[in-house]
Image (cartoon, rainbow, N blue to C red):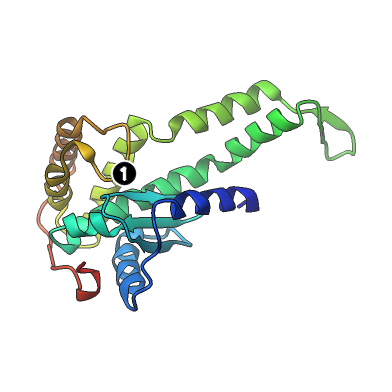
Amino acid sequence: MDALVRERQEAFLLSLGPLVKKQGVKEALTEVGLRVAGAVAPLDFEVVDSDVPRSVSASNGMVWVTTGLIKRCANEAQLAAVLAHEVAHVTQRFEQLPHLRALRVACRRPLAPALLPDGGAAPIDLNRAVRQGAEAVVAFGHPKEEADADEAALLALAGAGYDPAAYEVLLEALGDKGHDGSRFQGRARRRIELLSATRAEKKLSGGKTPALSKSLRF
């Protein structure tokens, strides 16, 4: 992870509000997050003190949710759904990083040569670099990316023993505002329909809906 990229990501996340430093909060959130994270690592889960119901993630593994969103979660399964969705985005964005770096190289040093194994030099394929980098940028927040993250969240919930239907219930409660600032905003009904169809197709049903731990009750 480039230091500049990490610095900018951290600055954006901190602009949402101050981190909650109360003992046990980060640990409780991390425990839920790791249940649905699978092999994705490293991850850094934090709670932001803000009444705005929001969840965000970054390619360096940061997954942050606001106290406002946690308050809207009726149970741990709903919170786990949010975290699983954001973890899916971490994976998506990590996979896009090489293309973003290629775009930066193409923009900053358009004529810089690339060294070949024999010591010779070959020009950077600018068209390819720009195309892949642009595709990576456009993909962030795209409805398909969001739909893929939602599907991954359902599978993660089922795999961790949570009730996948809890995600739909949360989105119903949040309405058009959603939780992630995605381009699904204003189209909550369509998003819920897609989730329901995916659950039916993959035969995902049942599971637990435990109460939130005391550390996560704000």
Please state which amino acid type lies under the numbered disc 1. Answer: Asp
> Does 192 sit above or below residue 203?
above
Q: Residue placed at 39% from the left, 35% from the top? A: 141
Q: Is residue 59 visible?
A: no
Please give left or right for residue 63 compared with residue 184 in the image: right
- Coordinates of residue 80 in the picture (x, y in percent): 25, 58
Closest to the observer: 67 or 114?
A: 67
> Is 22 rendered above or below residue 54?
below
- Which residue is depicted at the point 13% across and 67% down? 210
Q: Is 162 situated above or below 165?
A: below
- Residue 215 lies left or right of residue 142; in this view the side is left
**Residue 110 place in picture, x, y as percent:** 76, 26
Residue 184 in the image, given as x and y percentages of width and height:
27, 33
At 21% from the left and 67% from the top, the residue drawn is 218
SS category of the residue bearing label 1: loop
Q: Is residue 17 above or below residue 192?
A: below
Residue located at (23% from left, 41% from top): 178
Q: Is residue 212 visible?
A: yes
User: Along the horizontal axis of the image, is 116 left or right of 46?
Assistant: right
Along the line of sight, the residue nearer the viewer: 80 or 177: 177
Residue located beneath label 1 in the image: 180
